[in-house]
Amino acid sequence: MHISEGIFGEIEGKEVKSFFLKNDHGMEVTCINYGCTITKILTPDHQGMIENVVLGFDTIEEYVNHSPYFGCVVGRVAGRIGQSEFELDKETYHLPKSEGENHLHGGNKGFDKVLWDAETEESTNEVKVTFIHESLDGDQGYPGNVKVMVTYLLNNDNELIISYHAVTDKKTLLNLTNHSYFNLSGDVKRDILGHELTVKSDQLIELSETLLPTGELIEVENTAFDFRKGRLLEDGVTSTHPQNQLVGGGYDHPLVLSANHQEEIRLVDQQSGRKLVVETDEPCVVLYTSNMMANTFGIRGVQARKHIGVCLETQHHPDAIHQPSFPSIVLDKGEKYNTTTKYRFSVE
Ligand code: G6D
């Protein structure tokens, strides 16, 4: 096991630091303190070829100018908040509108766009980097001074374990996730439509025209959203289901998880043999097959295009503050925000 640091670049006159986490089996995770962004995950295929399996860049300028949330932590609130406002204890809070009338992914300067402090630790069987950020009262319109810690831990079981911890001095909202785009083909050799996904989920959350939850849950039975026995992601593109068509062909949907910590999410690329198992304590995972990816930039020499990466954003249900039936994302003073998601890489 080994962890080392480097200088990735500079932004607003401040150094952007990079961290290289390596285990004893050739797996490596690279991340930077700008948005806690994972820039690379190197894993072997079934022939032992070690290649990168996430979308990312090699310069901070590309992240600033092009990144559709590649690899970053999203917050204070992942997903959309309808009408960019919410009420807590009879007080209404107004957030920046970052997508039409709605607020998306924590706003125009959310957690993905700030420089976090970082501390590293190394031991025999694990290495980790802990990112720390103090989000001040009123940050992007949210109440409360919130101290957030995000830890990326790599161990010798080829697991990347992401833990999120936070406290607040005033009632607020918090719903964090990591927005990595996975592509198990290796160095983006192919798109992700040939990847097979299995998810223990019986229901998806129906989206409106502006991609906000309607509050209705749809049974996955007999739809292209039924991943219970495994399904190729291309089914979402060929599907005539109105929800697949609404998001531009593919998926951009919250799936309600019917199990936790039991291999509830499994992504396999048969051609490379790579497998990713995701386990989480979160109630939901947003499946996004990069249907809206612009084609105006390159990704380490590969032209960006739709369906080039798949996001598995474990989190609470989107826009929960406006849906009383959804699990709450309110964090009160004196409460501790704690959640963990584990990504285990292997070959079939
Ligand atoms: C689009 O609707 C999608 C989101 O789910 C995604 O997170 C974003 O692009 C990057 O807005």
Image: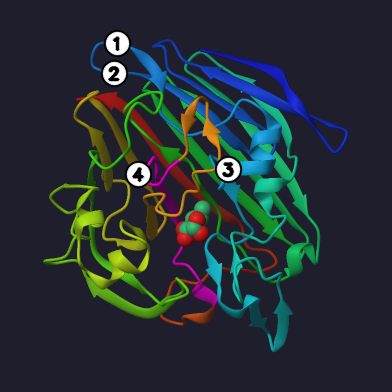
The Cα atoms of the two marked residues, 2 and 4, are separated by: 21 Å
Dot 3 lies on which element? loop
- Which label sits on residue 72? 3
Q: Which residue is mark 4?
A: 279
Mark 2 vs mark 4: give the one in front: 2
- Contact between labelled residues 1 and 2, with CB atoms less than 8 Å apart: yes
Percent of width and height locating residue 242: 26, 72
Task: Compare residues 192 and 275 and report the one nearer the observer.
Answer: 192
- Contact between labelled residues 1 and 3, with CB atoms less than 8 Å apart: no
Dot 4 lies on which element? strand
Between disc 3 and disc 4, whose residue precedes?
A: 3
Residue 347 against residue 305 in the figure, above or below: above
Dot 2 lies on which element? loop
Query: Which quarter of the rendering shows the C terminus?
Result: top left
Q: Which residue is mark 2?
A: 45
- Which label sits on residue 48? 1
Q: Is mark 4 within 8 Å of ligand 1?
A: no
Task: Compare residues 227 and 172 and report the one nearer the observer.
Answer: 227
Residue 267 against residue 237 in the figure, above or below: above
> What is the quadrant of residue 72 in the picture?
top right
Start and end of the magenta stretch? 305-321
> What amino acid does circle 4 point to?
Glu
- Contact between labelled residues 4 and 2, with CB atoms less than 8 Å apart: no
Dot 1 lies on which element? loop
Between disc 3 and disc 1, whose residue precedes?
A: 1
Between disc 1 and disc 4, whose residue precedes?
A: 1
The Cα atoms of the two marked residues, 2 and 1, are separated by: 5 Å
Percent of width and height locating residue 11: 80, 35
Label 4, residues with CA under 10 Å away: few <14, some 14-19, many ≥20: many
> What amino acid does circle 3 point to?
Cys
Percent of width and height locating residue 226: 18, 59
Mark 1 vs mark 4: give the one in front: 1
